[in-house]
Every structure is written in C-alpha cells, then in structure tokens.
Image (spheres, rainbow, N blue to C red):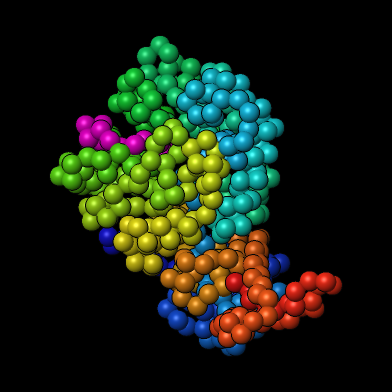
Amino acid sequence: MSADRKQPQPPEDGAATGVGATSLLLSHARLADGRAVDVRLVGDRIEAVGTAGSLGPVAGGARVDLTGHLLLPAPAEPHAHADTALSADSPGPAPYDDSYDVPCDGEEVQRRATEAALLQLGHGATALRAHVRIAAGRGLTSLDAVLLTRRSLHGLGELTPVAVPRLLTGAAGAEGRALLRDAVRRGGVVAGGRPDGDPDPAGHLEAVLTVAAEHGVPADLHTEGDDPVWLARLAAMAGELGAGVTIGPCAGLARLPSEVAGRAAERLAAAGVAVVCLPQGGCGEAGSRGVAPVGLLRAAGVRVAAGSGALRDAANPVGRGDPLEAAYLLASQAGLAPEEAYGAVSAEARAVLGLPEVRVEAGFPAELLAVRGERLAGVLSLAYSRIVVHRGRVVARTSAVREYCDSAAALDLPRQARTKRPPEPGGPQAGPVVRS
C-alpha cells in the first residue's frame, strides 16, 4: 500500500528553533539504510543530519553517543487499555463488560494508567491512544483518572484517551450517549464505542459517529469486525464524517470467507477507515483471540497500524505493551518485511493518531528511538537497550547487560562492548559483559 508522503516543513514562527530552545546532538548513529550519521536536534525538531563526526552540538547543548545504535522514528501506541492495564492480579470481577457499571477507584486507575504509560514510553512509544470505559455505574471516573495521567506525563509523552461506552441505543443507552458527549467536551478525548456489545450495533455506530461529527473529533471503535453488513454500514457512514475513523482489533475479519472479507476491506479503504490490529493477541473479552488479516487489508489499500492492546490484564496477563514486539510478530507471523512491520507501529500508527510524519531528516519532529543493533531485523529480534527521544530530549533509557562466566565459548562470542568486572567473593570468576 502506498501512502502520500509529506515534505519536511520548517517550524512555525516562535516554535522550537527560537531563542532559548534546548539542543541535543545524537552522534554516530546508524540509520535503517546503513548510513552512519550525526543528528542535531533543536527544540522539538531535527535541525540537521550529517555524516558521522561532521556535526557539533549547539553551544551549551548536550550530546549522546549512539555508537552501536540504530536510530529510528519513534513508535506510537494506537490501541491500549489504560483503565484495565496491570490489573490481572487485582481482586474483584474481570475488568471488562461485566464491570462497566461497577464503581471504580479513580486513584487506583490513575496509578495503574501512569505505570502502564511509563512502561510503554520506556519501550519507545512517545504517543499513546488508550481506550477507557465510561458507563452509568462509574460515570467518567476512569476517564478523569486517565486525563490526570495525561497531565502528569506532560513533557514525557502524549496520551490521548478514547471514551468507550457500552450501550448507546434505546432507552438504556440514553445515559451512555450523554456521557459520551460530556467526555468529548473535556477536550483531547476521542469518541469511542463497542458496537459488538450493544443490542443494536448499527445504531451504536451511528451514535458514536454523530457525536464525533458534532464535536469534530476522531472516532475509534473497538470491534471484532466479523459482521460484513455492519462493516458496509460503517464504510458508508465514515465516508460522510470529516474526522478520521479507526476500528480494531478486527480479528473476526479473518474468520470471514476471503471473498467477503476482501469486499469489506475494499469498502473500508474507499471510506478511509483505518484498522489497528493487535499481533500480541486480542483484548476486551478474555476469550477473544486471533489477528486481523493484515495482508488482505493492505492489499485492498487499508491503512493498517499495529497496537498492543491488553497489558497484563484479564485478557492477556502476560501482555507486554511493546510496539517492537508487535512489529516482530507482524514480521515473523504475518509475512511482512521488517521495514513494513516497523512502519505499522511507527509511521502508520502515527498517521492513525493524526500525528505528523517523522523521518530522520531536517525539519521533522524530534520523536526518535535508538535501539542497540545494526539492522532493523536484528533490532526486532532482540531490542533490549533503548534510548527514547520526545520533543528533542531524552525521556527514557533502558540498558540491558548480559554476563557470561569465563569460558572458551563465551570469550569467542562476537560482542558490541566488553568489560570486566571483579569476581564476587566466593563466587565464580566473572566473565565478559555484553551490552545488548
């Protein structure tokens, strides 16, 4: 699938390159095309890119040596679940449909949502979109907690909540419709929904898109996508909506006959509906599994991004929330080339979120991820050590060190860095330390 590429644009007047803007030099980084470069950041933009060793920092600016690192556009997370993250071991009912109307502890939600967001930021996702339940029994408590998390993350990353009611149709859905309108009025909130859980899925869809159109916000619907009639209705309505429409995880689309799924994909592409797949597994109902038919969707021209979904909650107690793992799974199981797989969690994910494109070129946003490794395939295989840059400054570092005891095999291993540490008293002789 080809996508229109934006040309680099200079920062707006008074933006990051103005007086007092911070600067950072990323030296001796390797790009995906094999070039070794220096990258100078000023404020929240890439100011210059040159051959390794050719650039110096701005006076008073910082420098980070990225020797041995691959420098990439930062990934984004287009489908997280902030209010259920890290709740797998929590007491009480499974935090999904059955607990929509159960009052929640806002402080607990905020604590877990913040921890989850920081975890995903450490993986490299400098922008996140997180689905949050709203309903009669809990009102907007969870949403308000996630909005507090967003404020606490200011300067570290961007978090956008999606307000997700369960019922929106009939008399029973009146409060859900009112809550959804109240939610998007708070600002920075996407209109969401779960049509699969409403007795009238088409009516649910219409209610969400109506609110999105009224307030000029995007719409993001959590659905299995296994009803071709509903998908056709979605495509027809989405074509009339000015804002973007995203659906996911759409694992049910893979269970439809290929001809039916193909026609549905063509309609989605024509309407500009994006699909977020979840290679790490389903989310929402714990029994939901499978992955959307990525190849079929891409062949039809649908924009396909990849998200993480469940992060150690009832649906996936071992979910990692790691965009590079999602890319790895797309490459290893869905047959995508490493560059296409990484694009699904970076360029395509950012486009779904309505964010500007990032390239390691002058004029583009300084949203970057440095991973120890030489080639993209290797990075997707073993992405241990990472340096995350948001708005032109380092906001997270992860450094992994692997140690071997002395042996002929260990001494002959290729390594990126080698140091010796003194032996521990009474312990085995320490061997080479390999930074990964």
For residue 415, which quarter of the picture?
bottom right
- In the displayed structure, does residue 44 sit left or right of residue 300? right
Quadrant position of residue 402? bottom right
Q: Residue furthest left?
A: 259
What's the residue at 57%, 20% (across, down)?
102
Above or below, 91 relative to 348: above
Identity of the residue furthest to the right in this view: 425
| Magenta stretch encompasses residue 397 | no
Q: Is residue 407 above or below residue 199?
A: below
Q: Quadrant of the N terminus?
A: bottom left
How far across and how far down the image is residue 127, in percent?
A: 54, 52
| Residue at figure coordinates x 47%, y 44% from the top left | 309
- 13 relative position to 282: left or right: right
Occupied quadrant, residue 32 = bottom left
Query: Who is closer to the viewer here, 152 or 427?
Result: 427
Q: Residue pushed farthest bottom?
A: 54
Q: Which quadrant of the rendered structure holds the C terminus?
A: bottom right
Residue 99 vertical position relative to residue 190 in the rendered view, above or below: above
Is residue 326 in sight in this rendering?
yes
- The image position of residue 10, as x and y in percent, is 50, 68
Please indicate, yes or no, whether residue 354 appears anywhere in the rendered image: no
Is the residue 271 above or below the residue 91 in the image?
Answer: below
Q: Residue at x 45, y 34 (%)?
A: 286
Magenta span has 226?
Answer: yes
Residue 122, percent from left and from top: 61, 57
Q: Which of 152 and 399 is in front in this view?
A: 399
Number of marks drawn: 0
Question: In screen coordinates, is 85 left or right of 336?
Answer: right
In the image, which residues are magenta? 215-232
Residue in view at x 38 percent, y 41 percent: 289
Q: Where is residue 109 in the image (x, y as percent from the top left)?
A: 64, 34
